[in-house]
């Protein structure tokens, strides 16, 4: 069995383990106990990583790491063209396992990972590394977790903000790289959405407390749109305000808006504010009314580099259905840059 196939099988086994784990009431073996402990510890280290959100992420990855889905994904590339290299991964930590797709892409193409983990999401990534190297010892030489200065890499994939991207470009600009900046996700409503669609939009807005680049942070609505229909449809998500960190953000942002005399709409757990920006603070959702759907589509094309996902029904070519932004497939690459193709070409 060649190394490519061994790595492939290791990820298939990881997927099977994750699918079993999320169905367990209590851990039933050593590794499920270790993962259960990691889920608990990750919440202690990062208050946004509630058990529910971490389990949601583990479940999503479990559903993707099947033999069929992984085969369909990697078989669309010629992995024999890969020139083995060490890839420095600078990972974000805004949502659980946010850097896992890069980690998977580097290893499945036959390259080595040198990872700088975010302190906000190091517990789960370290568990994944330990599990994989236990079931496939050959991977020990292919995964390095870097604590200090990173040296000896050939390629860089770095995820950060617009500010850190300038720092990344300064330090890593001399080697082939993918440097990701801030992106936001939006929804375009026409007023014809069903209550079910608007309820599903709540998943796109509230999952991971809106901290992901795939979280909807703004909605575009027609001139005569009644927000009471949206508030009514997403009311089931109101327990989110019981989370202390979310509630603190909600209270703070509401106070700032009111002191600034901004006109806001508020339902007790979500603040709606009219704003041209794509990026809204936690517990807020920006909105903008449009006169012409055609003019809006032209604007969204111009702003492609600022947008990760567009949720809608019959609006744009690569739109995402309501409730699906946090369930990307293996081919949904961040910033629409094909990571696997990049790794095979460099």
Image (cartoon, helix red, strand yellow):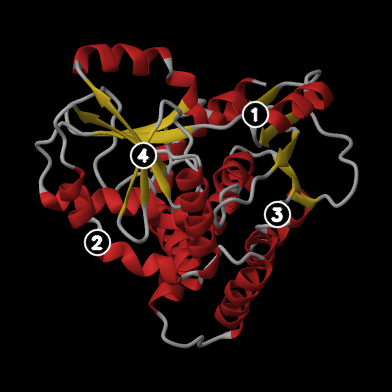
Q: Nearer the viewer, residue 241 or 203?
A: 241
Q: Nearer the viewer, residue 109 or 300?
A: 300
Q: Nearer the viewer, residue 86 or 258?
A: 258
In what element is the residue under mark 2?
A: helix
Q: Which residue is mark 3?
A: 139
The answer for how far apart the CA atoms under marks 4 and 3 are is 55 Å
Q: Is residue 13 visible?
A: no
Residue drawn at point x = 63 percent, y = 40 percent: 106
Residues under numbered marks 1 and 2 in contact, where contact means CB atoms less than 8 Å apart: no
Q: Which residue is mark 1?
A: 162
| Crowding at mark 1 (Cα within 10 Å: few <14, some 14-19, many 20+) | some
| Crowding at mark 3 (Cα within 10 Å: few <14, some 14-19, many 20+) | many
Disc with the residue nearer the chain's start (4 vs 3): 3
The answer for how far apart the CA atoms under marks 3 and 1 are is 33 Å
Residues under numbered marks 4 and 3 in contact, where contact means CB atoms less than 8 Å apart: no
The answer for how far apart the CA atoms under marks 2 and 4 are is 21 Å
Residues under numbered marks 3 and 1 in contact, where contact means CB atoms less than 8 Å apart: no
Residue drawn at point x = 47 percent, y = 61 percent: 15
| Crowding at mark 4 (Cα within 10 Å: few <14, some 14-19, many 20+) | few
In what element is the residue under mark 4?
A: loop
Mark sitting on residue 235: 2
In what element is the residue under mark 1?
A: helix
Q: Which residue is mark 4?
A: 263
Disc with the residue nearer the chain's start (2 vs 4): 2
């Amino acid at each position: 069995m060649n190394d490519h196939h061994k790595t492939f099988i290791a990820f298939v086994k990881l997927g099977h383990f994750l699918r079993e784990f999320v169905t367990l009431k209590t851990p039933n073996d050593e590794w499920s106990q270790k993962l259960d402990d990691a889920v608990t510890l990750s919440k202690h280290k990062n208050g946004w990583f509630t058990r529910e959100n971490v389990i949601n992420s583990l479940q999503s990855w479990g559903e993707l790491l099947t033999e069929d889905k992984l085969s369909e994904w990697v078989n669309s590339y010629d992995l024999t063209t890969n020139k083995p290299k060490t890839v420095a991964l600078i990972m974000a930590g805004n949502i659980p396992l946010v850097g896992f797709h890069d980690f998977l892409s580097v290893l499945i193409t036959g390259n080595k990972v040198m990872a700088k983990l975010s302190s906000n999401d190091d517990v789960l990534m370290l568990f994944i590394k330990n599990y994989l190297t236990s079931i496939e010892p050959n991977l020990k030489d292919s995964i390095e977790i870097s604590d200090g200065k990173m040296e000896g890499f050939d390629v860089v994939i770095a995820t950060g903000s617009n500010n850190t991207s300038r720092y990344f470009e300064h330090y890593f600009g001399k080697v082939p790289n993918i440097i990701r900046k801030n992106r936001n996700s939006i929804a375009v409503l026409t007023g014809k959405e069903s209550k079910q669609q608007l309820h599903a939009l709540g998943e796109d807005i509230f999952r991971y407390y809106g901290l992901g680049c795939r979280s909807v942070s703004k909605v575009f609505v027609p001139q005569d749109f009644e927000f009471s229909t949206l508030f009514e449809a997403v009311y089931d998500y109101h327990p989110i305000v019981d989370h202390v960190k979310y509630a603190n953000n909600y209270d703070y942002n509401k106070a700032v808006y009111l002191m600034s005399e901004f006109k806001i709409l508020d339902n007790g757990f979500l603040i709606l504010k009219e704003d041209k920006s794509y990026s809204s603070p936690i517990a807020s959702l920006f909105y903008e009314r449009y006169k012409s759907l055609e003019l809006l589509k032209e604007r969204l094309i111009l702003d492609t580099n600022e947008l990760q996902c567009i949720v809608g029904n019959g609006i744009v070519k690569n739109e995402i259905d309501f409730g699906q932004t946090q369930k990307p497939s293996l081919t949904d690459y961040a910033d629409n840059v094909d990571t696997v193709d990049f790794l095979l070409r460099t």
